[in-house]
Image (tube, helix red, strand yellow):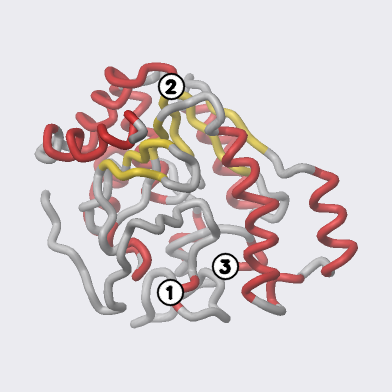
Amino acid sequence: MNTLKQKVGELNLKYKNLKAEEIIKEAYQIFGARVNFASSLGEEDQVITDMIAKVAPKIEIFTLDTGRLFQETYELIAKTQKRYPIMFKIYYPDTKSVEVMVHTKGINLFYESIENRKLCCGIRKVEPLQRALKDVDAWISGIRRDQAVTRGTVETFEWDENNQKIKINPLAYWTLDQVHKYIKEHNVDVNPLHAKGFISIGCASCTRAVKPGEDIRAGRWWWESPEQKECGLHNNPNRKNMGQGSRVKDQG
């Protein structure tokens, strides 16, 4: 068995009671330069960026510029790069692949079928992610259990089968209220679109504001059913989906 994969259970047992900042610090102690952090500039990711800057500033942070992000997201990238003197890299999709896709499928192909949408996500996000993860053994993400039906059983440490890496989710058991509390207490910069009802922010073409009472992921790919709402970055065949109404108790 893959020796990295074997470490997942051990890590969850050993570090299950640590705070998010401590998990990040331990991640760097364990993996050093072979761990990085994928930021989409969402609220959770901005929290983790702030934590990394304070407890493990040598961890490389990267983001994926799909070419179709909101202008507000680009402005937040610039502000974040200026605020934190840490490594912040940007990965772009392969130009030729985008050109072929748009030529054969159309500029807004993703509205026509789930297959087309996943193709677009694959070219604009998944392939660049694979390049970003090429030289690491583990990567950090900002996903939480109560973000989506597809994430209801996320653990702090899990095996990323698609990329054959250890995936570290320091905020797995956090609630959205905890995220907002940290942002307020530490004056963390966030995307102004959040104040306009955008909870989860991705590409401008595939994201809308969430209406009162809707699920927090309702604004992403709103034309698809909830169990389809992953772009491929956080898919995990070993993770069981929970019911739409399921929410996991916060661990503090």
Mark 1 lies on residue = 227
Location of the N terminus (image quadrant): top left
Q: Nearer the viewer, mark 1 or mark 3?
A: 1
Mark 2 lies on residue = 34
Residue 162 at what x, y percent from top left?
49, 47
Q: Is residue 163 left or right of residue 147?
A: right
Q: What residue appears at the point 66 percent right and 52 percent down from the top-left corner?
A: 71
Label 1 or label 2, whichever comes before in sequence order: 2
Q: Is residue 107 visible?
A: yes
Label 3 or label 2, whichever comes before in sequence order: 2
Tell me the CA gap for discs 1 and 3: 17 Å
Query: What amino acid type should be assigned to the residue bearing mark 2?
Result: Arg
Q: Are marks 3 and 2 in contact (CB under 8 Å)?
A: no
- Judged from the image, the secondary structure of the residue bearing numbered disc 3 is loop
Mark 3 lies on residue = 207
Q: Is residue 171 left or right of residue 80?
A: left
Count up the numbered dots.
3
Residue nearest the viewer, comparing 186 with 105: 105
Which mark identifies residue 189?
A: none
